[in-house]
Amino acid sequence: MVRKNVSMEDTHLQKLQPFLDKNNGNLSAAIRDAIELADAALEGHESVEDALEYFTEGSAKYPEMRNNLIESGECILISQLSFRWLIENTDGILVADELVSELFNPYQIKSTSYLLEYLNKRSMNHGWGIEASLINWEEDRTEVIVLEHGDPSLRAFLAEALSIFLGRYLNLDVSFVHRKSNSILIFLKEYKSDAEVPPGIRKNFGTLDYTFKEIKNRPDFWTTLVERYMMHRYERVNLNRNVFEVFLSGGVPDITSFFEAFAGKPIREIPLSELFIICKKVVSVTQLVNEIERTSEGGKMHVKIRHQFSDETVILKLVELFSKVFHAAGYIFEVRTISNLIIFEFAGAC
């Protein structure tokens, strides 16, 4: 037993009063109980200051605020596991505008700095544990929003809602999103938007948004189509009506307009490397052939198309179909067929 003199003011003794009452006025026993309680309170906190801030600000606010929100019907309790499932299984679908407006008031928030200040305050009051800050990326002086800590699913949800707000109300778009284990970096760029969600936000957060909306609009059609594709292991061909009509009539359609639509420019302005990428997209969508790949042989570019057709007439039509595209783009090439392989060899260096 180590005995030491302890100096305390009246305020400290008053705080020890509950422990003194418990121990019949025995100060040593009261202090021991206080130490045990302090030890339990420090668990899960990095410092005494962190624990004090949590218990003096956090715990006093969260239960009262939480109960008020539940009683008013504005919020409900949901387990972390359920919340994570919900966020992960709606990944790629943009957060609705009304939900974004509910989180961040567009009539009150007029700048990025105030938006982050508002988010930090709401995070503290609701116990989210997420911290938002704005930094300048040194390489190109790009403004970057950093969201750190908190639950990863909640952090991802807030990053998306925050980005949509920036696009809708503050004339900003997202050029890139870097997700780390404990943070999300949102790289910003200026963008004037009337009503639509900017393309960068849709690319980084809403890749499946249009798809799910279309499925909801015509569920019977898309459900049946997916079932058929799965049943036939994707051995089905998907063609536009006018293209199919040309094939039925015995001709070979001109599909250069599809390439121009993909590239957003005339066929003559599409580089060969980009033309190949679009070819892969067309093949993936139509399932006309099995695979298309690009190789370099003897300093020249080769495009190899693999298919499963055995009829010579059908193979020749495939050759003519792709040849029309390459000719329209202004490229010189030679073509040969070997069994289930069509090879285009382009003149000049890669």
Image (cartoon, rainbow, N blue to C red):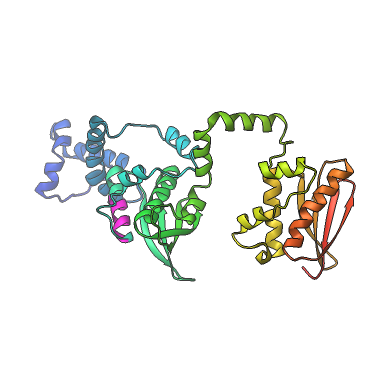
261 sits left or right of 194 in the view? right
Q: Is residue 115 magenta?
A: yes
- The x, y position of residue 204, in whole percent, is 50, 52
- Image quarter of residue 313: top right
User: Which residue sits furthest front?
Assistant: 249
Vertical placement of 297 versus 288: above or below? Answer: below
Residue shown at the point (45%, 53%) measured from the top left: 183
- The x, y position of residue 221, in whole percent, is 58, 31
User: Which residue sits furthest left?
Assistant: 10
Q: Using the rendered image of the protein, determine whether residue 149 is visible from the camera's viewpoint.
A: no
- The x, y position of residue 337, in whole percent, is 88, 52
**Span of residues in magenta:** 113-121
Residue situated in front as seen by the camera: 337 or 33: 337
Residue shown at the point (28%, 38%) measured from the top left: 36
User: Is the N terminus in the top left, top right, bottom left or bottom right quadrant?
Assistant: top left
Residue situated in front as seen by the camera: 188 or 22: 188
Q: Is residue 58 magenta?
A: no
Residue situated in front as seen by the camera: 46 or 257: 257
- The x, y position of residue 116, in whole percent, is 32, 56
Q: Using the rendered image of the protein, determine whether residue 244 is visible from the camera's viewpoint.
A: yes
- Image quarter of residue 234: top right
12 sits left or right of 341 in the view? left
User: Is the C terminus in the top left, top right, bottom left or bottom right quadrant?
Assistant: bottom right
Residue shown at the point (42%, 45%) measured from the top left: 157
Number of numbered markers: 0
Vertical placement of 297 versus 152: above or below? Answer: below
- Image quarter of residue 25: top left
Vertical placement of 114 versus 214: above or below? Answer: below
Please, what is the dominant secondary structure of the magenta stretch?
A: helix
